[in-house]
Amino acid sequence: QADDKLTEKEKQLITASIQKFQKGEHSEGKNFIAFAKTMNDGFYVQTVKIFIKEEQDHAAVLGKFMQLHGIQKITKDPVDGIFRWLRKLAGIEGTITVLLTAEIIAMVYYKALKKATRSVILKEICHQILVDETMHLAFQSDTLKVIYKNKSAVSLFVSRWMHRILMAGTIAVVWIFHFKVLKAGGYSLLRYFRETWKEFSKCEQ
């Protein structure tokens, strides 16, 4: 839709934010696939490949929207770089923990972006990403629970608290870089924190 509406003011509001999320959505997933193979479950590996393809699709449709409105893609983002580095640190558990954290953030971010824009295309993109991320949250949290079953009580305690610390830090960082879009979508800092932590708590059960 070449006539998709996006005012100059709105373009300025979302450009830096959407550039970062578009970059974060794209990954070849080679390390994740390699870690997934350590689970010795062929069905799980195939499911991981489907997950990676859906994330790549998110990046692709966001990229097309950006191209339509003259928004340049970025090749590097420090926060995304840190997340990619963290995913490589602790094998399958670390990868899933970081991915789950990012997807919890995405659930609130795309709700805010959907409300903040008047673009029909961007609203549709946000809606589809939210549908996909709901399934991704269930997939990643269920896998993490399987991994947790094989841990000792002490190790499980440490893993859960490390994830909570990562979640809290990520919430803060995302607010710093994306607060304009979040606020435009109706999220105060308190509401943003509460809704994000609510999504986290559901995944932690």
Image (tube, rainbow, N blue to C red):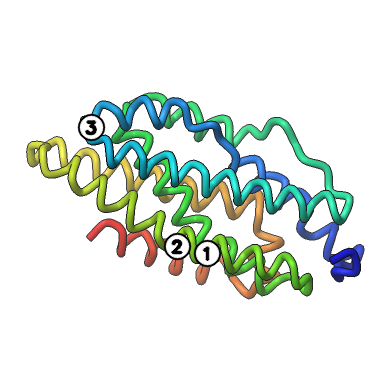
Q: Earlier in the sequence, mark 1 or mark 2?
A: 1
Do callouts 1 and 2 mark residues in contact (Cβ within 8 Å)?
Answer: no
SS of the residue under disc 3: helix
Position above or below: 132 against 80: below
Question: What amino acid is found at the position of numbered circle 2 in the picture?
Answer: Thr
SS of the residue under disc 1: helix
Quarter in which the C terminus is drawn: bottom left
Mark 3 burial class by Cα count in 10 Å: few <14, some 14-19, many 20+: few
The circle drawn on residue 39 is 3
What residue is pinned by disc 2? 196
Query: Mark 1 or 2, which is nearer the eye?
Result: 1
Percent position of residue 32, x then y: 40, 31
Q: Quadrant of residue 124?
A: bottom right
Give the residue displayed 12% in from the left and 44% down from the top.
Answer: 149
Q: Earlier in the sequence, mark 2 or mark 3?
A: 3
Question: What amino acid is found at the position of numbered circle 3 in the picture?
Answer: Met
Residue extending farthest left: 152
Give the residue displayed 33% in from the left and 36% down from the top.
Answer: 45
Q: CA distance from mark 2 to mark 3?
A: 29 Å
Give the residue displayed 49% in from the left and 66% down from the top.
Answer: 131
Quarter in which the N terminus is drawn: bottom right
What residue is pinned by disc 1? 130
Q: CA distance from mark 1 to mark 2?
A: 14 Å
The circle drawn on residue 59 is none
